[in-house]
Structure formats: C-alpha cells, structure tokens
Image (spheres, helix red, strand yellow):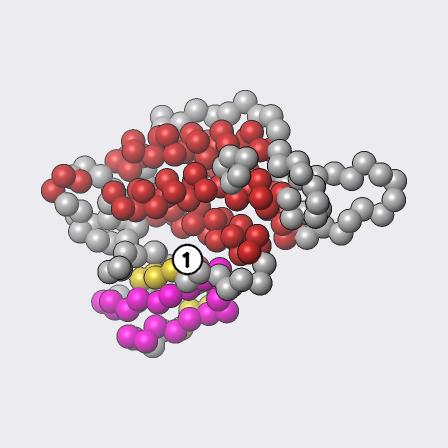
Amino acid sequence: MNCCICASSLWDDETGRMICRPCERRIADNLKALSGPGGLYARLCLRIHPGSGNSTGPAVSGTRGAPIPANLQVLNLTANGGIVSALEAWVEDWASYGLAAVGAGGRLQHRIDWAAGTLWLNLPQASRRHPALDEFAREVWNIRKQCEALIDGDKPARKVPVQCSSAGCDGILRVSIDTPGETCRACGREYGHGEALQLTPVRTAA
C-alpha cells in the first residue's frame, strides 16, 4: 500500500495507516507553524497595519481619520472567513468522523490556536481513518505558503518538489506559491498556477 499523499510505499510498521510518518510530520509542522503568538497567523495580522503590536486578530483603527491602507489579501486571510474558517471547516469535518471536538469560538487568534491544535492533536488517529488526508495536506500546505509569501515580502518563495499527475509519469516539478505555471520535463505536460499548487508534495533525497 502507498501513502495517499506522496505515493511512497508504506513500511511494514505503517500497516493500517493511510499516510507515511514523514507526511504526517510535515502536516504537523505546517499546523504548528500557523498557531501561537509567534506563528504565521499572528505575524500576518501585523502586516495589516504596520506598527500594530496586537497579534490577537486583525487590527482595527480607533481614530476618525483615514485608516492606514490594509493589504486586502492579508485582510482576507486573517479575517473571519479566511484561514480561521478554513481550519475550522476541517475540524467540523473531522468531528463527523469522531476525530475532533469543535471549538467554542472567541477571538480569531484563539480560534486559530484551537483549530490548529485540535487537528495536530488528532492527526495520528486521522492518519488511519480520514479519507481525505491528501486534500487536507494540500490545503494546509497552501495556507502556510501563502502566509510565508506575504510575510517575507519580496523574498523569493521556497520551491517544493511535487509529483506530476500524468499517468505513468515519474516527473518531479518544483513549485512555489507564486509560480505562474510549470511544465513537466519528463512528459511535457503543462500546469497552470492553480493546477501546479494542487500537485502532491513528494519526498526527495537530501
């Protein structure tokens, strides 16, 4: 049996699992990177209004004058309906499989911490039971990449190896969050921006 995320063969001691342990660790790392006072979500909130020291949620101007222009892409990700809603939707989905407990609401940072923490805590069980771990892994990875790209500003986004999805092709492409598109050198298949970001991350030799 193969891992449903990276397609690597599962080891004998991974029998009964749907994903390999390296992929599980990668998902856990991505979840942990998003939460906490020094996490990507908190740092992203600080980019809405430069100079704001409040990391508990998007800053709101308390003056009657013109507010400092916000980065709309950052605002969309940090506001209700952005990252927090995406993670909470997965918590609700996992709860339907008996794999998580839905949070009680609160401030956005608290909700992010609860959702990411709940998913991380229950990931070992989900690795054996949840039928859409590949979709979940891609979404969490894409969220992390978006956050890092916006926080880093002009720094080039890190490229990640992904598997070409053409039948029988072993080609590996390297994509980043800002890639306009990629072409597989092995089979020549072309991928647009959205298609490239949906390809499955793979392990490669160090």
Which quarter shows the C terminus?
Answer: bottom left
Q: Based on the picture, tell me whether residue 181 belongs to the magenta stretch.
A: yes
Q: Is mark 1 on a helix, strand or loop?
A: loop
Q: Is residue 187 above or below residue 197?
A: below
Q: Where does residue 150 sit, x and y in percent of width and height?
A: 57, 54
Q: In which quarter of the image is residue 32?
A: top left
Q: Which corner quadrant of the image does residue 7 belong to?
A: bottom left
Q: Is 41 in front, or is 76?
A: 41
Q: Does the magenta run of residues contain 169?
A: yes
Nearest the eye: 96 or 29: 29
Q: Give the range drawn in magenta.
A: 168-187
Left or right: residue 99 versus residue 10 is: right
Residue drawn at the location 57% of the way across and 52% of the way down: 151
Q: Is residue 95 left or right of residue 36?
A: left
Q: How crowded is mark 1: few (under 14 residues within 10 Å), some or many (20 or more)?
A: some
Which secondary structure dominates the residues rendered in magenta?
loop
**Nearer-the-camera pick, 140 or 34:** 34
